[in-house]
Amino acid sequence: MANAAKPLQLPEAVSLFHRLLSPQKQNHPPSIFTINRLLASIAKSKHPNSYSTVVDLFNRLKCTRDRGVSPNNHTFGLVIDCCRRMGRPDLAFCVLGQSLREGCGVNTIMFGSLIKVLCVSKQIGLAAKVFAKMPLMGCTPSVITYNTLIEGLCSIGETRLGLELCRKMATEESSSKPDVITYSSIIHGFCKEGEIDMAVEVLKEMAAQKVRPNVITCNILIDGLCKNGDVITARKVFDEMPPCGLVPDLHTYSSLIHGLCSQGDTNSGLRMFDDMAAKEVAPDVYTYNGLILGFCGLGDINKAFKIYDKLVGSGIQVNEFIYNTLIDCCCKKGAFLRASELLQEMRDRGVMPNVVTYSSIIHGISAVGDWSRAIGVFRDMVTQGISPNVVTFNALIDSLCKQQLTCEAEKLVGIMVERGEKPDVITYTTLLQGYVLEGNLSEAEVLFKKMAIKGIEPDQHSYSILINGYCKNDRMSEALHLAEKMMKQGLKPNDVTFHILLNAVSNHESPDEMKKLISEMRDVRKDEDDTNSY
């Protein structure tokens, strides 16, 4: 009896299927009900080939119709669902079409499976077309089908269309009304798109429809509010949860801690952390990340390490993000020995340093002008098999330029290109600064022209550096010509550029057109100040 109750393994189930449809069984064929049960049991098995096996057996079934066994509506639905799980919308369409051709019809479940696999495959437009066909085929979309399409629309940034569909659900005479999943998907979509006001509006609409939010809904909104800098509203949502019978969980607390600390309010972040402990909500590595990021952002390395010690003491695995944050903070504070110790600790704990780790160290060392040591770290990085990125190269270039080794620094651009890294505006602007500091304006001019050839648009800082160089060398005509070009590019002169030019013009007998340009620059700055005052 025990053996009879034991589920069939995939090879046994396939063997049984073939025996049931063998020519010897032609006079006593199995019922389609038996075949459907066998296919369903295969689909439910945990074998990696279970879904493809169902599709293969279905095709075999089509070849044995002369033995009196034909698939029915349930068979087609089962196979379409397997196509969904395989991520094969093409096969699902074929099976749906066959069901129609053979007079078995279609139902809401079949359409739901097809729409689901289309949405997962990011074919949202086609999913919407299939959805629109459902009423024409006599099928009313279920809440699950609506939610699938709404989630698909939100995933491609079409949350407003998702909201329209939700409102259609709410107003139509149908049993398919929006539920908490519907509204949560839309709130999540608006939060991802940065439309926080719309997300809050949907929460109010949800209440008007008498649909109660759950913890997941609140977590989505709190996380979105925090990431968009509205921690005050996020805290209000948090405070309203317990009166609504909702208990904040790990995600709720972690999102708020990140939000508070990202704005420098680490004291409130710590109080929230203590509240977690009081409510017996265990923090995870992401929770600790928020606090460490907050203290590092404030430059409070000692408190950051106190939180780190708590994390290590908790037994939670420290990840590379936390190590990178601490190492970057150490380097910015000049604590290079502590940064080196953390680097070794990473390796000892089996956490491999990455390009961010090394770039932070190189940038920190470069900032204090120790270019030889920076080169040493760079070589160690390459030896470890870690490919430097544009940030790494820019840090090295900055270090060499500060040592007035700009020609050597520019050679690194060639190495960057050889390694598949594209120099950016920061790369060239750093080199410009180096040549200007060395008084080598001719090379600076060549480099500035090279930026245009390479398709890299100079930014405000790039222009300011070269303008400053011209002014210091009494080349006022070139300085003002470049300033005019800068303004034509839509770039506003910053304080430094403006005052350098103003002083230079004041100390020289300048032509009227130069004075006119200064006047225009002054007007632009005034307009900008007036705009910012609103």
Image (cartoon, rainbow, N blue to C red):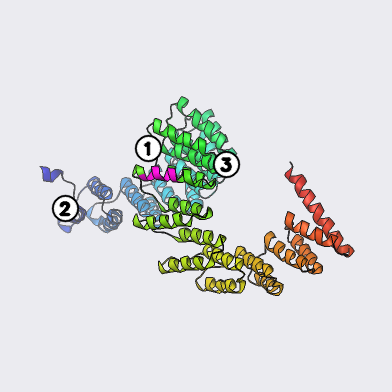
Distance between the Cα atoms at labels 2 and 3?
A: 73 Å
Q: Tell me which amino acid carries mark 2.
A: Asn
**Residue highlighted by disc 3:** 229
Q: Tell me residue 205's x, y (percent).
A: 55, 32
In the picture, the quarter occupied by the N terminus is: top left
Q: Tell me which amino acid carries mark 3.
A: Gly
Q: Tell me residue 452's x, y (percent).
A: 67, 70
**Residue highlighted by disc 2:** 27
Extreme top residue here? Answer: 243
| One can see residue 178 in this view | no
Is label 2 or label 1 in front?
1
| Residue 17, picture quadrant | bottom left
Q: Nearer the viewer, residue 533 or 111?
A: 533
Residue 282 image label: 1
Left or right: 381 in relation to 54: right
Alpha-carbon neighbours of circle 2 within 10 Å: few (<14), some, or many (≥20)? few
Q: Nearer the viewer, residue 402 or 196?
A: 402
Sequence-wise first label, 2 or 3:
2
Residue 108 image label: none
Q: Residue at x 57, y 71 (%)?
A: 413
